[in-house]
Amino acid sequence: MRVFVAGGSGVLGRRLVPQLVARGHQVTASTTSAAKLELIAAAGAEGVVMDGLDGAAVGEAVALARPDVIVHQMTAISMTHAGKPDIKHPDRWFAQTNRLRTEGTDHLLAAAEAVGVPHFVAQAYASWNGIREGGWVKTEEDPLDLLEGTAAYVGLKALSRIEDLVLNIGGAVMRYGAFYGPGAIDDQVELVRKRQYPLVGRGTGYSSWVHLDDAASATVLAVEQKATGVFNIVDDVPAPASDWLPYLAECAGAKPPLRVPVWLARRLAGDQAVVMMTEGRGFSNAKAKRELGWELQYPSWRQGFKAELA
């Protein structure tokens, strides 16, 4: 197949593009940096410099690639694009990413329609943001929590909009858990080692994780099978912060995390951090495993953290 990966030099794109090439697909991968074209070429793909917020540039790049499928992985979360992580103000930290997930999505969908691209796969999110009622683990049938009235709402609403648009054209939505793997959580690990990533309250909020290579392999399956619908791309073990954060610290060779009360965490880190740590809901991967035939290299973050950090 001819596959156009928008955002092919990002943290997931760097793992996805080689997997697609290894499976025999002809891949065109976009990047915003000419310096990264060599990286894409080394993976066996054709690189193109493209500004995802420039509708004409997106249209031209897609038209030249003539893809059978577009994979939307455009973000701007790295420190190069977004600066130092600002958990308290995700609306500011994710401002450029939110534009890529709104305007950028519109440009890709318009290009797909203009060229007649038959399939579309898009990145979404499913880590701690399941609806905060009922059980601690959610399926694709359960609603997401958009945290209305908080600084996180803009970004979560942008992701919800992507889901609606992509499902409306019969595409696939990949709700990835929290990424870890090469380059994914370096900033978090640094904070853990400095004991600046504390547990909030009792740490009862659940999160779901996924290794970058497993996220990429699920995406390859969605491309090849022309999958439709929503898929939670997470590992087998959703877990409370009181489990995964101390273990992450242990694997990183750090002291156990400090604990802070909810009122202080809300003041210092904002609503999103408090919800994630105290009330977050994780996700089930049963549908992705059943319908895509997905098999994980790292079924648990316990295996993955140890492999990456020990």
Image (cartoon, helix red, strand yellow):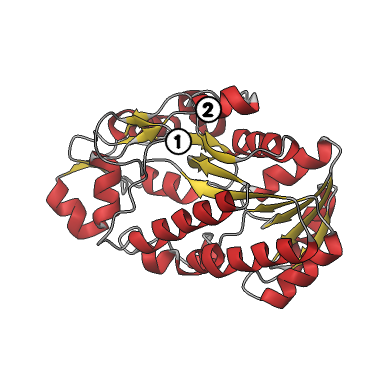
Where is residue 215, by image quadrant?
top right
Residue at left 38%, top 49%? 191
Left or right: 183, with 91 as reference point = right
Q: Residue at x 14, y 45 (%)?
A: 261
Q: Position of residue 279 (x, y in %)?
A: 24, 40
Q: Residue type at mark 2?
A: Lys
Dot 2 or dot 1: first in sequence order is 1
The kind of residue tagged 1 is Glu
Q: x, y percentage for residue 22?
A: 82, 36
Q: Is residue 307 above or below residue 19?
A: above
Comparing 291 with 206, the one in front is 291
The residue located at (50%, 33%) in the rendering is 234
* Residue that mark 1 sits on: 140
Q: CA distance from mark 2 to mark 1?
A: 8 Å
- Residue 203 lies left or right of residue 189; in this view the side is left
Q: Is residue 98 visible?
A: yes
Image point (62%, 73%), residue name: 53
- Where's residue 131, x and y in %? 31, 41
Front in this rendered view, residue 241 or 206: 206
Is 127 on the left-hand or right-hand side of 149? right
Q: Reply above or below: 22 against 262.
A: above
Position of 25 with respect to 88 (left or right) is right
- The circle on residue 287 is 2
